[in-house]
């Protein structure tokens, strides 16, 4: 049977849909059979490393095969998959494109660590797709271009608008893709046993083989395959936990009972003497750090002298080489300058102060906001700030979703305007399967930790804890702080990025399920990275090179330039991700604020307001981005330290930098409206173009 994706065409057809249904049905059955085979081999003695390698190479091999079979040099196929992807499959591909490492890996972890506050991500990301469906998708598809900068450039009749939009798309997508490649490295390292840095570049090959060879055509069909893997991998462990804890295979319906049990356990842990001892030790350590920060140069000199004396003592006593090496490493990692010491110790102080709270610094899971609206003035202020931050984050995620270039580009791949709208509906369904499950997963993992791990003797802790600590101690570490030999909740540091990945091992499932979950996380990261890299290369090759610098470039040359730039961008993103710049969710959330501020005012005004002109669009994008970047830089401690800005972070109304777009988006919208009114109106042709956008399309209209 011929591979159905390797031919060009302008419309999807019933025959194509039948072939797609048959192929993906066989693919799903094949994946299930592959997992069952590995499960059988595990029972017969197959090692964990071989299971990990099998999942890694088998899944990446399938994606590579689709990429090779879908290779193309045709611009229509490379940029928009020939505009013939059926709504059902475009919705599935959009779901995979959307459910990045942040959704698959980070969301459950954020809900685990933040409780109720993490629901802002579920509300914001789901609401954003409603905005896309109602306000943007059908109009962008009716316009019939390749990219978001392409639409803005033609709608406003300005290459300057196109250039600003292309540069913004590159910046937003690069931040986002760094987070995905970070996730790729994390999962590849766990599956293969390679170091994180090598895992980044090994996983990168799986990204490139699809987007490099076949562009949007290869990416689309690969993302459908990746969605099937990631959703199965996500649902299996949480259904298992639900059956284990409640007897029900529907975790979304019963996890409320587990929330009640968690609340009871939280009260017990808060009063536990062992936990109180841990808190006291952490407070003492925080006080020591605060004392060191009062005179950083003197404290740094003391630390160096102490470490040097320890090395000299061990050498004089002819201590074992391993002890000497540990002491030498402790000396080598000390900060080199007082400025570095201040930055490091400030971060350590903040971390210690957070951990020196009940429940290891986590808020009670069912508590809506921090503080107390009926308490004293400090408690009321904390409550108000917490509620403002929750609503601000929801706003940024809703609007940011509607501005993400790699999601909006999927509007161009359907055969008609009607199918573009249907595609968003399918996307909501496919995404909802994961988003409605993530809160249940977080609750059941927390119950498992509270009920099983806490109180376990250190000598009896499961092996997966030390294995994950080797991948990155910042993700998971335990230490006997109060020296009682038992694990207290405050003695366990777990990063949100691995909560989902450790779920199968925490639940006592066979290792083959852990491998499948890791393969699902890899599919989520690869699918989004593919779409983002294609967006960046399209902005560079199509919107800047072809539409601005060299309009006469041939179709083959444009695709070649796009592939070359895609490769260079991927290598640059991998190099940045290898430095572990921040956690996945922070990077992704920053991208949402930037996307909302850069694109949404210009897009919405471009569709619904004929008076909006090029000057207004440029002002809106530049002002929105400028305000967002300024606030994020001045309010974020890590960015302030990286840019060597003196003084503490400056928050406006207590809003955290993750929601910087709450200031940039309204500022950009106001600037776009004001400048449009103060400058000449668009030409008659551009005004008629807007009327044409809002004209209802016939059911079959492309």
Image (cartoon, helix red, strand yellow):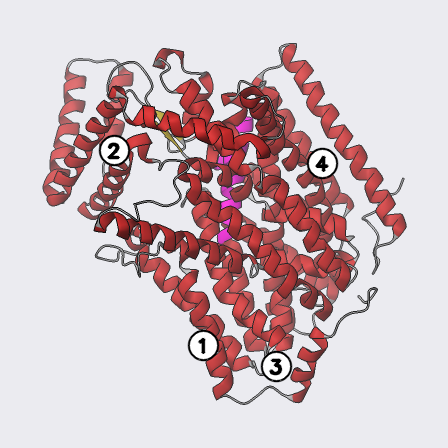
Secondary structure state at the residue bearing disc 4: helix
Please give left or right for residue 208 compared with residue 3 in the image: left
Residue 219, horizontal then vertical, whole percent: 69, 49
Q: Are marks 2 and 4 in contact (CB under 8 Å)?
A: no
Q: Residue at x 33, y 30 (%)?
A: 359
Instruction: In this rendered view, identify the residue nearer to me: 115 or 76.
Output: 115
Between the residue at mark 4 and the residue at mark 1, the CA separation in whole angstroms equals 48 Å
**Which is more N-terminal, label 3 or label 2?**
2
Question: In the image, which disc is placed on residue 62?
Answer: 4
Mark yes or no: residue 480 visible.
Answer: yes
Disc 4 vs disc 1: which is toward the camera?
1
**Which is more N-terminal, label 1 or label 4?**
4
**On screen, residue 136 above or below 22:** below
**Which is more N-terminal, label 4 or label 2?**
4
Secondary structure state at the residue bearing disc 1: helix
**Which is more N-terminal, label 3 or label 1?**
3
Question: Within 10 angstroms of label 4, few (less than 14), some, or many (20 or more) residues?
Answer: some
Q: Quadrant of residue 239?
A: top right
Question: Which residue position is annotated with label 2?
Answer: 356
Magenta stretch bounds = 175-200
**Which is more N-terminal, label 2 or label 1?**
2
Q: Residue at x 39, y 67 (%)?
A: 627
Between the residue at mark 1 and the residue at mark 2, the CA separation in whole angstroms equals 45 Å
Secondary structure state at the residue bearing disc 3: loop
Residue 699, horizontal then vertical, whole percent: 82, 64
Instruction: In this rendered view, identify the residue nearer to me: 486 or 175.
Output: 486
Please give left or right for residue 76 compared with residue 313 in the image: right
Question: Which residue position is annotated with label 1?
Answer: 671
Question: Which residue position is annotated with label 3?
Answer: 610
Between the residue at mark 2 and the residue at mark 4, the CA separation in whole angstroms equals 47 Å
Instruction: In this rendered view, identify the residue nearer to me: 331 or 433.
Output: 433
Between the residue at mark 1 and the residue at mark 3, the CA separation in whole angstroms equals 16 Å
């Amino acid at each position: 049977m011929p591979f159905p994706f390797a031919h060009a065409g302008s419309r999807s057809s019933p025959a194509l849909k039948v072939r797609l249904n048959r192929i993906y049905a066989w693919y799903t059955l094949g994946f299930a059979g592959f997992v069952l085979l590995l499960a059988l081999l595990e029972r017969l003695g197959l090692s964990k490393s071989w299971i990990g390698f099998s999942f890694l190479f088998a899944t990446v091999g399938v994606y590579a095969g689709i990429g090779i079979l879908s290779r193309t040099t045709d611009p229509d196929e490379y940029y928009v998959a020939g505009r013939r992807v059926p709504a059902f499959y475009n919705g599935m591909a959009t779901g995979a494109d959307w459910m990045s490492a942040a959704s698959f890996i980070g969301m459950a972890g954020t809900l685990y660590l933040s409780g109720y506050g993490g629901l802002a991500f579920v509300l914001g990301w789901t609401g954003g797709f409603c905005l896309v469906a109602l306000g943007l998708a059908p109009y962008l598809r009716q316009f019939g271009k390749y990219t978001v900068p392409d639409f803005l450039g033609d709608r406003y009749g300005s290459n300057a608008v196109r250039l600003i939009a292309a540069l913004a798309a590159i910046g937003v997508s690069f931040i986002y893709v760094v987070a995905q490649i970070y996730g790729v490295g994390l999962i590849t390292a766990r599956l293969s046993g390679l170091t994180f840095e090598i895992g980044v570049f090994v996983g990168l090959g799986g990204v490139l083989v699809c987007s490099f060879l076949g562009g949007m055509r290869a990416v689309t069909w690969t993302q459908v395959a990746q969605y099937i893997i990631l959703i199965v991998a996500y649902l299996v462990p949480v259904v298992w936990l639900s059956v284990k804890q409640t007897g029900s295979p529907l975790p979304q319906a019963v996890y409320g009972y587990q929330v009640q049990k968690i609340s009871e356990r939280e009260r017990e842990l808060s009063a536990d003497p062992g936990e109180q001892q841990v808190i006291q030790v952490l407070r003492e350590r925080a006080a020591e750090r605060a004392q060191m920060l009062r005179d950083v140069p003197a404290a740094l000199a003391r630390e160096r002298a102490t470490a040097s004396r320890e090395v000299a003592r061990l050498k004089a006593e002819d201590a074992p080489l391993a002890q000497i090496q540990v002491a030498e490493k402790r000396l080598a990692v000390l900060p080199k300058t007082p400025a570095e010491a201040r930055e490091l110790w400030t971060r350590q102080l903040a971390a210690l102060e957070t951990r020196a709270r009940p429940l290891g610094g986590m808020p009670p899971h069912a508590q809506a906001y921090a503080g107390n609206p009926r308490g004293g003035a400090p408690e009321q202020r904390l409550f108000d700030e917490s509620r403002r931050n929750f609503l601000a984050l929801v706003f940024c995620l809703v609007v940011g979703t509607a501005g993400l270039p790699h999601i909006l580009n999927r509007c161009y791949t359907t055969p008609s305007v009607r199918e573009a709208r249907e595609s968003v509906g399918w996307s909501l369904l496919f995404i909802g399967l994961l988003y409605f499950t993530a809160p249940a997963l977080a609750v059941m993992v927390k119950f498992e930790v509270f009920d099983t791990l806490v109180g376990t003797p250190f000598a009896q802790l499961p092996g997966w804890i030390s294995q994950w600590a080797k991948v990155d101690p910042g993700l998971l570490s335990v230490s006997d702080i109060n020296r009682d030999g038992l694990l207290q909740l405050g003695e366990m540091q777990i990063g949100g990025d691995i909560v989902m990945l450790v779920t199968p091992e925490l639940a006592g499932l066979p290792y083959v399920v852990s491998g499948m979950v890791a393969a699902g996380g890899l599919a989520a990261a690869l699918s989004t990275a593919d779409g983002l890299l294609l967006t960046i290369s399209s902005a560079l090759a199509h919107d800047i090179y072809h539409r601005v610098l060299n309009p006469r470039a041939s179709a083959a040359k444009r695709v070649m330039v796009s592939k070359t730039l895609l490769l260079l961008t991927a290598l640059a993103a991998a190099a940045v991700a290898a430095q572990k710049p921040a956690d996945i969710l922070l990077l992704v959330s920053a991208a949402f604020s930037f996307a909302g501020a850069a694109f949404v005012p210009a897009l919405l005004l471009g569709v619904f307001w004929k008076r909006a002109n090029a000057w207004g669009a440029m002002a809106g994008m530049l002002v929105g981005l400028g305000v967002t970047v300024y606030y994020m830089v001045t309010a974020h401690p890590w960015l302030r330290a990286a840019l060597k800005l003196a003084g503490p972070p400056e928050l406006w109304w207590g809003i955290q930098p993750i929601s910087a777009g709450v200031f940039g988006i309204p500022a950009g919208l106001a600037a776009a409206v004001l400048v449009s009114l103060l400058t000449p109106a668009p030409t008659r042709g551009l005004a008629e173009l807007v009327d044409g956008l809002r004209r209802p399309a016939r059911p079959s209209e492309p």
